[in-house]
Amino acid sequence: MYLQDRKMTQECRDLISSLPRQGDGWMEGETTFYQYQGVWLANLFIQGVVAFQKHFQAHDTDILIATIPKVGTTWLKAISFALVNRVHYPDLQQHPLLTNNPHVLVPFLDMDLYNQKEVPDLTFFTSPRLFSTHSPYSLLPLSAKNSTCKLIVSLSRNPKDTFVSLWHFANRLRPTSSGTLSLEDAFDMFCRGVSPFGPYWDHVLEYWKESLENPQKVLLILTYEELKEQPTYNLRRMAEFLGSPFSPEEEANGVMNDISKLCSFENLSNLEVNKNGKSFNGKENNVFFRQGQVGDWLNCLTTEMIEKLDRITEEKFCGTGLRF
């Protein structure tokens, strides 16, 4: 699963040797970052990203969740799974999310399935198939871009909170022998765009622009913050976009509120599977749950850091209409 790879092929080794490289990575196993087609990737994930690009064949009914790391991916996976499968699991007391981590129910194509095998067997996934990816739009396979599937449900987040969440996440995954990644070193890399599947701003802008040009295919939940402030409103938007709007009966029975509670950070983080369970690679599931709060950057960043990130964000998003 997450952070798990297969033996690197010679083709991938040759590719990596030709790519620009940048120092140390963020997490365990990410010894070096390489720039592949303008995107910074850890050596651990390049093989999976390339195999995903080359071999994934999208179905018209596929649903693909696309996010940059640490913008609420786990939460969005849980919501999407609950929405898509609510007919199959009407009894929320027996729901798969109560006993399975969302990353198991909605696997990554690039970091999981295609990272374990160049051409994985996807036949056991029933329609509509629900997958996820951290790859930016530019790295998606042509089949995903050209098919009529509901390609993207994408989520973005204030870059200051995204950075702080990524820094904490990285340190929770790093072995003690590697030491702690300092806030200053992580901040420098993030600002230079050297972060997992970054630069952050390019990733967000690609999906933002595509959502404007093709709104029937790409739904952009504008921000993590908006999803927290108006969960039922955004659940309704997502259900309509996915072609399964809530029926009057579901509305009357409070199904939206039930799904919102089921998928809330408070509920998911306190489940036994997410408190003490482990992923396929042996990592504890609790690494995916820290605080789930908005504005934690106020507790971590200096005034100078805040001003620098705000300046970069303003420059990157200038003239796009995208704001946080």
Image (cartoon, rainbow, N blue to C red):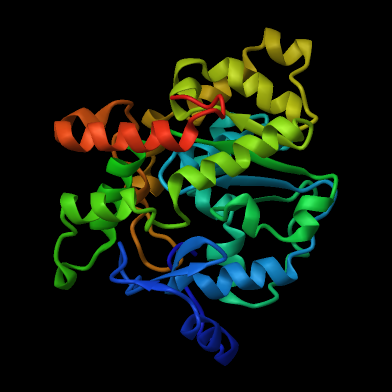
Q: Looking at the image, which residue is at 56% across and 24% down?
A: 321
- Residue 270 appears in the rendering: no
Q: Looking at the image, which residue is at 83% across and 52% down?
A: 146
Q: Position of residue 224 (x, y in %)?
A: 46, 29
Q: Position of residue 218 (x, y in %)?
A: 71, 36
- Residue 34 appears in the rendering: yes
User: Vertically, is 261 above or below 173?
Assistant: above
Compared across the picture, whether 257 is left or right of 272 comes to right
Q: Quadrant of residue 87?
A: top right
| Residue occupying the far top of the picture | 252
Give 209 or 61, whichever is nearer the viewer.
209
Compared across the picture, whether 186 is left or right of 99 comes to left
In what quadrant of the picture does the C terminus appear? top left
Q: Where is residue 267 in the image (x, y as percent from the top left)?
A: 41, 31
User: Vertically, is 232 above or below 107?
Assistant: above
Q: Position of residue 9 (x, y in %)?
A: 56, 88
Q: In which quarter of the image is residue 70?
A: top left
Compared across the picture, whether 313 is left or right of 52 comes to left
Q: In which quarter of the image is residue 120?
A: bottom right
User: Vertically, is 138 above or below 245?
Assistant: below
